[in-house]
Image (cartoon, rainbow, N blue to C red):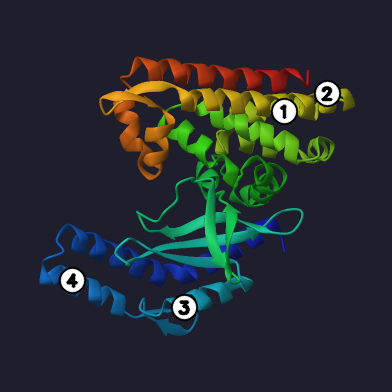
């Protein structure tokens, strides 16, 4: 079967879930209305109706009140190629994430390639990674669905080849749960260079540079630069493709030094003393105590001179690490 035929087949399989996606959207709308007006009988009644609405796919009929049966039915489609994750909010109400899983191009394991539906408030603190409950335990999956959306090439069949290749060769090593705090800091405090520097360091230290050099294609490099929006990583990988053995060794040494430098720079950033709630406080205190709502903390911090200076020092250190890694391959 050609790549184009496989892509079309997967798209057709995904359409099986259209009735389920429709019901999930209706339930989330009813849940949102109920949370806005919890005292109204009409909103509660509508919420109960949405839970009881029948949904049919794969020759069977289900209800949202049957989460276990529903998840098992989704998992049986395309030999486990799809997954329905259900997470309760603080009130015990379900939030849904229906996604497609694909195998890495090389080695064992799989990654999230597409989002078929995600509740607006489904917990996803780091969009690069998502935890799914499979086979009796929770696993962390590389989530490439945002990158697929940003793919600008009209050839979707090419994407079906490039996506698992990039996930397998690059992002399964570059993205890690240990980077959560750096990822949230980069996003909410506008220190984009920090996350890309951390990712490049992890990639250089966790993969065999020689093997990676041999597997890189121009399509993957374009994907990393544009679809994944990682220009510094793409520049490093382009230099890697043209590097000799000495360059590969220098890259690993530079990555080790970069890890230490970023660790020190981040600790200094966290230790920066700012005036918070009327008294001198290390930056780490409001950051860790508001870990799940950093966007609310970031706005008032923007006006603090101490924070601005600390952020610029952190960004400068990250940019210097990135430049050192690129230069090691020249």
Real-space Cα separation, disc 3 to disc 2, in angstroms = 52 Å
The residue that mark 1 highlights is: 255
Q: Which residue is nearer to you in this view: 64 or 89?
A: 89
At a point 29% along the width and 80% down the height, the residue shown is: 52
Which mark's residue is nearer the viewer, 3 or 1?
1
Alpha-carbon span between mark 1 and mark 2: 12 Å
Quadrant (top left, top right, bottom left, bottom right) of the N terminus: bottom right
Splitting the image into 4 quarters, where does residue 283 fall?
Answer: top left
Q: Residues within 10 Å of mark 2 (few under 14, many from 20)?
A: some
Residue lying farthest to the bottom in this orientation: 60
Question: Quick one: label 2 or label 4, which is nearer the N terminus?
Answer: 4
Secondary structure, mark 1, is helix
Total of numbered circles in the picture? 4
* Residue in front for this viewpoint, 186 or 48: 186
Q: Position of residue 150 (x, y in %)?
A: 51, 41
Q: Earlier in the sequence, mark 4 or mark 1?
A: 4
Left or right relative to 245: residue 159: left
Q: Is residue 315 above or below residue 32?
A: above
Q: Residue at x 35, y 31 (%)?
A: 298
Left or right: where 176 falls relative to 279: right
From the image, tell me which residue sits under label 3: 68
Q: Which mark is residue 247?
A: 2
Residue where numbered disc 4 is placed: 44
Nearest to the observer: residue 209 or residue 303: 303
Mark 3: give few (<14), some (14-19) or many (20+) Cα within 10 Å: few
Q: What is the C-alpha distance between the residues marked 2 and 4?
A: 64 Å
């Amino acid at each position: 079967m050609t790549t184009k035929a496989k892509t079309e087949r997967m798209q057709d399989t995904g359409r099986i879930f259209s009735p389920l996606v429709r019901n999930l959207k209706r339930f989330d709308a009813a849940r949102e209305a109920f949370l806005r007006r919890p005292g109204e009988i009409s909103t509660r009644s509508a919420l109960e109706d949405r839970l009881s609405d029948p949904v049919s796919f794969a020759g069977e009929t289900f209800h949202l009140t049957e989460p276990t049966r529903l998840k098992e039915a989704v998992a049986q489609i395309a030999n486990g190629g799809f997954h329905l994750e259900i997470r309760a909010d603080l009130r015990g109400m379900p939030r849904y994430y229906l996604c497609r899983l694909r195998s890495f191009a090389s080695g064992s394991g799989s990654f999230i390639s597409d989002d078929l539906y995600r509740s607006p408030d489904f917990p996803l603190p780091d969009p690069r990674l998502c935890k799914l409950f499979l086979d009796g335990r929770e696993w962390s999956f590389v989530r490439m669905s945002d990158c697929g959306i940003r793919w600008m090439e009209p050839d979707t069949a090419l994407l079906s080849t490039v996506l698992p290749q990039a996930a397998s060769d690059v992002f399964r090593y570059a993205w890690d749960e240990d980077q959560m705090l750096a990822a949230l800091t980069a996003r909410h405090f506008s220190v984009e260079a920090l996350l890309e520097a951390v990712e490049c360091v992890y990639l250089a230290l966790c993969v065999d540079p020689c093997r990676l050099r041999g597997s890189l294609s121009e399509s993957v490099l374009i994907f990393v630069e544009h679809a994944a929006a990682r220009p510094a990583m793409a520049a490093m990988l382009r230099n890697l493709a043209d590097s000799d053995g000495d360059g590969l060794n220098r890259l690993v040494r530079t990555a080790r030094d970069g890890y230490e430098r970023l660790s020190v720079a981040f600790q200094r950033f966290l230790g920066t003393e700012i005036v918070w709630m009327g008294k001198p406080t290390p930056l780490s205190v409001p950051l860790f105590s508001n870990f799940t709502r950093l966007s609310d903390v970031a706005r008032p911090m923007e006006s603090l001179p101490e924070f601005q200076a600390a952020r610029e020092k952190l960004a400068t250190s990250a940019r210097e690490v990135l430049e050192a890694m690129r230069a090691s391959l020249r």
